Image (spheres, helix red, strand yellow):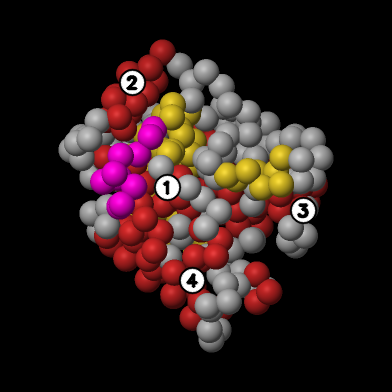
Amino acid sequence: MNSQVEPWAQFRCFLHRGRTDSPMRAMVIAAHPDDETIGASLVLSRFPQTEVVYLTDGAPRDRKLWSPEARGSREDYAALRRREAGNALAHAAIRTNQITWLGAVDQEAVFQSAELIRKLADILETRQPEIVVTHPYEGGHPDHDTAALLAQMAIAGSQSTALLVEMTSYHASAGACVTGEFLNPDANEIVCDLGAEDCARKRRMMDEHWSQRAVLKGFGIDRERFRPAPAYDFAKTPHEGRLWYECMEWPMTGAGWRLLASDAIREVQESDVTVGA
């Protein structure tokens, strides 16, 4: 952990500065197009070398889970979300060659976990980011939890020395959805209050995700939180009671997700790619 103190200190410093010239190499691993804007718009604007890796294409198979704005086929919806993401990231000066799509189907990433861990490990070894920002394991969305799994496993199983950092997403509390806060806050958390310019940029980015505007109304634009990621045990539930995606009655259950995650961890560990627990 001592080797990670300096990157964390540098990361904190550049987040709190108004300048956008950090030399640090950052990577944001987002489950869906718009998650990077919700949780890490400051990282995108402060670190010009940031690469964004999308775990899914943002388009579920079940049309009941689509935005009312979606038209055509699932592929059409995925293409729409891809365009929205590119337009949003342009407001933070993130170019198309800084964006990678891993190609999982929205809601189904955990089924491809082993394959995606290997893909992400290759990306990390090639790009060598110093900071990797992703979702916490909180039971808000099965793909968010899968992003947390992938990031932890890929860093452990590659030559990457990146510091793994979390952004906020959402989770259940007393049957309600909580956004913009960590499920279990700790002393390492940093709270960044966005200034007028940063808020305006984040608003413009959110507006580009017009197909998701009903969902995005539930997220603020004036504050972002980050912390070093804890070492999760993905065989355990993130919290007692119903997870948010169980409250929403989406196809996946917490028990089902944990079984698939455990199978993926075992498969990768038993393969010729060495990945830590």
The residues tagged by marks 3 and 4 sit, at their Cα atoms, a distance apart of 23 Å
Instruction: For the C terminus, give its image quadrant.
Output: top right
Main SS class of the magenta portion in the image: helix
Q: Amino acid at mark 2?
A: Ala
Identify the residue position indicated by label 1 in the image: 221
Which badge, 3 or 2, comes first in the chain's sequence?
2
Residue at horizontal 26%, vertical 46%?
A: 197
Whether residues under marks 3 and 2 lie with C-beta atoms below 8 angstroms apart, the answer is: no
User: Mark 4, residues whose alpha carbon is within 10 Å: few (<14), some, or many (≥20)?
Assistant: some
Q: Is residue 127 magenta?
A: no
Which comes sooner in the sequence, label 2 or label 4? Answer: 2
Task: Answer with mark 2 or mark 1, whichever residue precedes in sequence.
Answer: 2
Count residues near mark 3 (Cα–Cα under 10 Å), then give few for <14, some for 14-19, many for 20+.
some
Q: Over which residues does the magenta segment extend?
A: 192-201
Q: Counting residues from the N terminus, which is met first, the one under dot 4 or under dot 1?
A: 4
Q: Position of residue 136 (x, y in %)?
A: 57, 38
Residue 96 is situated, as x and y percent measured from the top left of the image, at 28, 62
Which residue lies under the disc numbered 3?
247
Above or below residue 88? Residue 77 is below
Between the C-alphas of marks 2 and 4, the distance is 37 Å
In-image side of 271 versus 99 (left or right): right
* Residue 83 appears anywhere in the view: yes
Residue type, numbered disc 3: Cys
SS at mark 1? loop
Residue, disc 2: 9
Whole-Å distance between the Cαs marked 2 and 1? 24 Å
- 167 lies left or right of 23: right
Tell me the distance, in whole angstroms, between the alpha carbons under discs 4 and 1.
18 Å
Residue displayed at 53% across by 78% down? 70
Q: Nearer the viewer, mark 2 or mark 4?
A: 4
Quarter of the N terminus within the rendering:
top left
Q: Which residue is mark 4?
A: 211
